[in-house]
Image: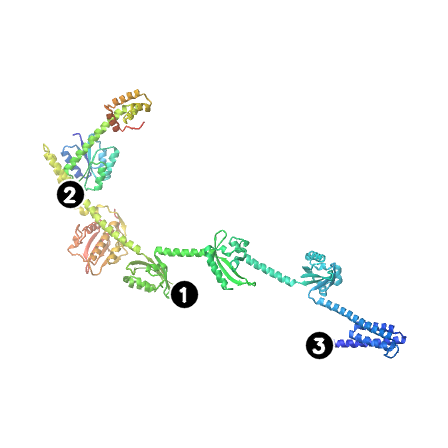
Amino acid sequence: MLQVKNDWRSQVRHLAAQCLCGGLGLVFLTFVCFRLGLNLATTGFAYLILVALVSLIGSFFGSLVLSIIAVGLLNYFFTEPLFSLRVEYPQDILALIAFLTTSVIVTSLAAKTRKVAEDAQASQKALDTIPALVWSALPDGTRNFYSQRWLEFTGLSAEDASSKGWASTVHPEDQVAVVDKWRTAVATGRPFEVEARGRGASGDYRWFLIRAEPLRNERKIIVKWYGSNTDIEDRKRATEALRQSEAQWKEVFEHNPVMYFMVDATGTVLSVNGFGATQLGYTVPELIGQSVLNVFFEEDRDFVLKNVAVCLGALGQPQSWEVRKIRKNGTVLWVRENAKAVRRSNNQVIVLVACEDITERKLTEDALRQSQLYLAEAQKIARTGYFRWGITTGELFWSDEVYRIYGYEPDEKPAINLAMQRTHPEDLARTQQHLENLMQEERDWEYEYRLLMPNGAVKYIRAVNRTSRDAFGNLEMVGSVIDVTAARRAEEELHQAQAQLMHVARVTTLGELTASIAHEVNQPLAGVVSSGNACVNWLTNQPPNIEKARQSVDRIIRDAKRASEVVGRVRDLAKKAPLQKVRLNINQAIQETIVLTRREIEQNHVSLRTHLSSDLPLVWADRIQLQQVILNLIINAIEAMNALSDGPRDLHVSTKRDDPNDVVLTVRDSGAGLDPRELENIFEAFYTTKRDGLGMGLAVSRSIIEGHGGRLWATPNEPRGAVFHLTLPIGRQEAS
Amino acid sequence: MNSFVFVIDDDASVRDAVEDLLRSVGLEVESFGSTQEFLQRKRPDVPGCIVLDVRLPGASGLEFQNALAKLGIHLPIIFISGHGDIPMSVQAIKSGAVEFLTKPLHEQKLLDAVQAGIQRDRARRQDAKLVGELQERFDSLTAREREVMALVVIGTPNKQIAAQLGLSEMTVKVHRSQVMRKMRAKTLIDLVRMADKLGVSTTKT
């Protein structure tokens, strides 16, 4: 507004100045011309010059006013009649009209010229305001104009530019290309466009987009080239940065050890990175355009399609899954796929998939699963279950085999009372006591108990537990339960077999004894019979041989005596086998023997106590024979107590040093006991108080012990039962 | 008489009584306490048998029976045993024992067994003697005569023998008559029997 106001004022001032100058000029010219007596035409020309001059500096309007004034002056001072506005001669009117016309034309021409000059100046200004380095060239390619910006940028003056040539401002590396292109453009008349670096005044180069278009006249002939150099340095940098960043991403895409796939909604591979292709044994072009299903196993394809469908159904939601892929060579590649469906700018929906090779993990997992299976299998085979019980927290874990052993379904929640339900009623109290003990202290425990299964079967269980505190100080117990039923059965059978064997051995010993007795007696008897036959023969021969017959009878007598001696020797048979005496620890011999009788002790519910003195000297004895004696005494004691239907069954085995020379072993039972009158008879051969007894055991035992220089005797026990005492001399050096 | 009974028993009562019994029926008897004693003794070359206790210290009677066979002592054995054991007696009889008797011995059974044993030995000896004579005769044949004999006894006609041995039929006939003469065979049947006893090889030598 202010600007407009200023314009208007300056225009008014301008107009005033024009009118003043023009008026003064007219006055001056009129005075001069009138004094000189110049005619109308001459004065008119003088006026025209003035009007033309004024119109060069003033406005058209001012000049027009001036022209009209000039016409008035001519009419008043230079046409007949003078000093009147009347015109005497018509040719003067024509002259005046001609003057006015000429003056208006001159004035408008001057205004036009001035306008053109102003326009040129304005367009020059406009060119300089264009944010580009503008130039123009002649049709032959010679540049004839450079905008102010161009000159400023290059630091050249217009003269320098035309003398040195614009090409010198182009980067030497780009010069040839630019010049060539420019020449080509000029020759062909096609628009010129090139990117090149231009040198600035400071000597730095910047990137420009140099373009030029030809200006053609009506006849299509090129009259001029107009060109501009647009500074694209920033864009170039940005592009370069973009290119670099793109290259970086490309790098990431291509070389990241992750397989990238881009597939369309139908599963066609749009793009895949080199790594992805390589991992599958393909090249990138081999995969692109193919169905992605080709790299999956036939049986996995439905799974893949389903997952892709899930992705497509939830655009932008990442999904992930694990699946096998098949390489070109047929080998398997396990991958974890992370996928996301996105809508592209062109409205196409695509699925981006990044896959990570998890083959190794998968194999490890498989191996782990396998080893877990093996472990479970091993537990199954070993009939060993594993459990963990947080005593403080109450958490309880059972392995599969524990379920199996306890006969529960695997979906049952483990609980202590479930275990208790299965525990054999006879072992229940003991087991509960054991559990209470377990909770008291940190240590390892071993415990055996029985289970009573719902079907009435009994299982023998051996538990090995460890009570300890975890990192939080909570008491917990880990352990294993082992089904030792089979072992127990085998052990029982073994014991049975052992017992049978023992029985057989005893019977066999007797059998051998009788065989031996029979042989020993039979031999002299055979002799007696044959000699008797011979004697008869000798006597019936003709003549009878009395001498021979007598000899036969002598032999009969001899053999008969021998037979009776044999019977007498039977009792001493035990001594016949040579003793193999060694120095031995009697306690150890007892313990070994007790192991053999354990089953009898347990089966007959006998409670065994041992009291073995620890400071006993070694004794000199035949281990086997001594153990046979001990075995005999223990079995006798058990059998004696077994004959009773009630009362305690206490078996007490003890050793002590009796006097400086002897070690005493006593076997005390709470059986029926012995009649005091029987106390000695029981050691006689074939004497027995047992229904199925053989009556040899104690006789032989005594023989053995006496063979060792010891003694074996029996006394009554209080309140009932019997005590067998056995002494053995201690093992001084003795000739064996 | 001309026979001998050997009694082997480690038990003197039995040994002496059996010896006495056998003597009382007029047999020549010699008794031994062990098999070693028996083996060391030079035995008279007359028919005989052994009365052997099965249960002997060292090698058992059965083992001794096998050992004797290996040594070429073919005396028949009568086993006596304190206790009859069926497998043992079966084994003994299978190995050629005459009898297996249990003690105390039944007089008649023992005497019968001893007689049978002596008889068996006598027959064996006669047989052995005959074979020895035959062997002597056979040894006197020439190699060619033996070849001819081998073919004759399997019934080969002269003509074939001649062809096989590359001789004339006449020569074969001469050899054949020599064989019959030297072997003292009256008929072809005799010769065949002799060949059988001798075990003359029926294959071409």
Q: Residue furthest bottom?
A: A84
Please determine if labels 1 and 2 lie on a single subunit.
Answer: yes
Query: Label 3 marks which chain's residue?
Result: A
Examine the rendering and report whether any part of residue B98 can be seen.
yes
Residue under pointer 3:
A2
Specify few, some or many for label 3: CA neighbours under 10 Å numbering under 14, 14-19, or 20 or more. few
Q: Which residue is mark 1?
A: A472
Q: Tag 2: residue type?
A: Ala
Q: Quarter of the image holding residue A8?
A: bottom right
The residue that mark 2 highlights is A563
Q: Nearer the viewer, residue B62 or A48?
A: A48
* Circle 1 or circle 2, nearest the eye: 1
Residue at 32% from the left image edge and 21% from the top image edge: B167
Labels 1 and 3: the sequence-earlier one: 3
Coordinates of residue A721 in the picture (x, y in percent):
19, 58
Nearer the observer: mark 1 or 3; the answer is 3
Q: Is residue B54 left or right of residue A42?
A: left
- Above-or-below relation of B126 to A88: above
Residue A236 position, x and y percent, is 64, 61
- Please determine if labels 2 and 3 lie on a single subunit: yes
